[in-house]
Image: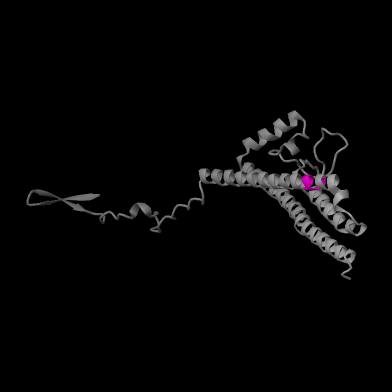
Amino acid sequence: MAEQTFWNGTIIMEPTDPPTDPDAFNKTGSGQPKKAKKMKKLGSSRGIETLFRNIYRVHVEVSAMADNKANFLISVNSIILILSAAHGKEVVSDEWLIIPAAIIIGSCIGSMIYAVLVARPRITCAKKPENETAPCLAQAPSLLFFGGFTRLPKDLYVEKMTELVINSEKIYPSMMSDIYDMGKVLNRKFERLQTAYGFLLYGLPGGILLYLTMQTILHMIENGVF
């Protein structure tokens, strides 16, 4: 605002308010500065989607790798067992050689069993209901995994999925729960895969080494060395 004053017939405009403070717009009426805007939450929607997409991709690739390793073990052990069955009588020329042969065969069978457990598709339910179409009784089934939602009636699944889509706050927790379940399955797979490779790693070389040692000793006994 300004006041008009007269000086020698001339109108002079005199300001009554102090100059405008550039930060005045950032101050409240009490003279206190306004609170700064809240910081944006870390991560954007695109970044979160990329994160979940990469996690799912890694889990799928690791699961496929575990299945390939299990299939490799099944093939190797099958070949060893077939050769053992076809040429067992020729190789085991003495009854003492049955011991290393049994170790080799037992190692292959144990490795194959655990490899099959890794590769075998299995859908589990914490508590099997009496009605096969009923959901798992111990916990709510996952709406993102076919092993969970296929136990629900179609109408109930559509209703639950609609609620999930409408309530966006539940989408990410559902995906996190699904990723956690996938991780538990992968952990169990690799534990069994490690056991399967352990059978093959220790049992097969140990059996072959014992076979060669016993065969050498038997030959030396036959030749009168001992």
> Which of the 4 image quadrants contains residue 78?
top right
In this view, the residue farthest toward the top is: 155
Secondary structure mostly seen in magenta is helix
> So how many labels did they put on this image?
0
Above or below for 46 versus 202: above
- Residue under the point 52% across and 43% down: 45
- Residue under the point 89% across and 56% down: 98
Compare residues 217 and 84 and report the one nearer the observer.
217
Compare residues 85 and 127 and report the one nearer the observer.
85
Percent from the top left, x then y, of residue 165?
63, 36
In this view, the residue farthest toward the front is: 223
Quadrant (top left, top right, bottom left, bottom right) of the C terminus: bottom right
Above or below for 226 versus 193: below
- Residue under the point 48% across and 50% down: 40
Compare residues 86 and 110 and report the one nearer the observer.
86
> Which of the 4 image quadrants contains residue 202?
bottom right
Percent from the top left, x then y, of residue 95?
92, 57
Q: What's drawn in magenta, residue-wise?
A: 77-81
Above or below for 147 versus 84: above
Is residue 168 rendered to the left or right of residue 38?
right
In this view, the residue farthest toward the right is: 95
